[in-house]
Amino acid sequence: SIYNNYDKIIIGITEGGPRVMTREETQEIFSRVFKYLSKVELFLIKNNIDDESAIPYFPKIWDVILTGNPSVIELAKKYNWKYRFIPRSEGIGYCGTEIRKLWRHSILGEQ
């Protein structure tokens, strides 16, 4: 379990997209989900990770980045940050990518 292996877990919420809700709305949902997990800290990160505009706003307070995001892994390699790959959640209702696909399909009729 990730939770048991680390003293603090920081979840960074960027402005990347496609967005279904604002960062603040995402933070509110995560706050409710992780309410009783005292080691979890949420951090709003300005700008987008994919174009590296978020880099100046990263809280440089981590020992290791845990991510399943290929863009974050590439940045970690580029900036020589310690990282560990963890697979992204899968399935409807658990994975942000899947939730966004469902939203786009329902709103825009995309597949």
Image (cartoon, rainbow, N blue to C red):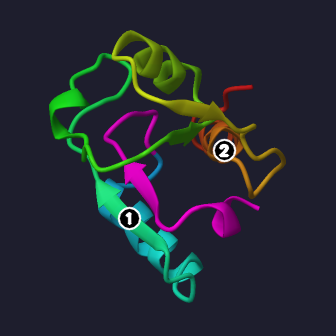
- Residue found 48% across the figure and 71% down from its top: 40
Does 20 lie within the magenta span? no
Q: Check the image and name the residue furthest to the bottom.
A: 36
Task: State the CA–CA distance, disc 1 to disc 2.
Answer: 29 Å
Q: Residue at x 58, y 77 (%)?
A: 33
Q: Amino acid at mark 1?
A: Leu
Q: Secondary structure at mark 2?
A: helix
| Farthest-out residue, left | 56
State the extent of the magenta-drawn residues as a range.
1-19
Given residues 110 and 82, the one toward you in this image is: 82
Residue designated by label 1: 42
What residue lies at 37% left-to-right and 48% top-to-bottom?
Answer: 62
As drawn, which residue projects farthest toward the right? 91
**Residue 88, relative to residue 7: is it above or below?**
above
Q: Residues within 10 Å of mark 1 (few under 14, many from 20)?
A: some
Residue 6 shown left or right of residue 95 in the figure: left
> Which amino acid, mark 2?
Ser
Q: Which quadrant is the C terminus positioned in?
A: top right
